[in-house]
Image (cartoon, rainbow, N blue to C red):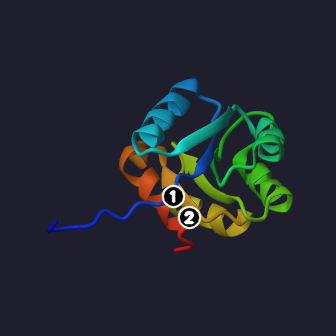
Amino acid sequence: MFGFIERRCPTARILLVDNHEGARSLLLSVLRHEHFEVCGEAENGQQALAKVVELHPDVVVLDLLMPQMNGIEAAPRIRELAPATKIVLISGCLPPQFGSEAVRHTGAQAYVEKWAAVTDLVPAIRAVLQNE
């Protein structure tokens, strides 16, 4: 009957962590367009830790470079607090090879460059939710 069957992930609860309000706003729009539930936002790693405990997100989209506590420091702590929570690191000013190293170092599951987030963030989140 239909030429294709759309495969969708179940709705995931996502916590956005970025110190730039404009970046959070863009990411929020992208995620809501794809029917993800953004359960909270934070401006730094310290706020992210508190929100992880409070909100129990499925995925944390975590900027690497932030004041007070950056993503490199926050990701391992998030892994300790919520081992089942997936972490997707993002950054707007680091070379791609650093992002891959950050994933290995922090225990995150993926890295997406901010400039490519409109096209790459949703597939990265879907992949980590499906343990790919």
Mark 1, mark 2: which one is toward the viewer? 1
Image coordinates of residue 49 in percent, x first then y, are: 81, 44
Residue drawn at (53%, 70%), measured in percent from left and top?
A: 130
How many residues crowd mark 1 within 10 Å: few (<14), some (14–19), many (20+)? few
Q: Amino acid at mark 2?
A: Leu
Q: Is residue 28 above or below residue 71?
A: above
Residue drawn at (76%, 41%), measured in percent from left and top?
A: 48
Q: Residue furthest bottom?
A: 132
Most foreground residue, 71 or 26: 26
Verify CB contact (< 8 Å) between mark 1 and mark 2. yes
Q: Secondary structure at mark 2?
A: helix
Q: Amino acid at mark 1?
A: Pro
Mark linked to residue 24: none
Mark linked to residue 129: 2
Horizontal placement of 52 versus 22: left or right?
right
Q: Is residue 129 above or below residue 121?
A: below
Most foreground residue, 95 or 3: 3
Q: Which residue is mark 1?
A: 10
Q: Evaluate whether residue 45 shows in this view.
A: yes
Image coordinates of residue 99 in percent, x first then y, are: 57, 59
Image coordinates of residue 116 in percent, x first then y, are: 39, 48
Image coordinates of residue 40 in percent, x first then y, are: 67, 35
Q: Residue furthest front?
A: 1
Residue drawn at (58%, 60%), measured in percent from left and top?
A: 98
Most foreground residue, 94 or 83: 83
Label whose residue precedes the other's in the sequence (1 or 2): 1
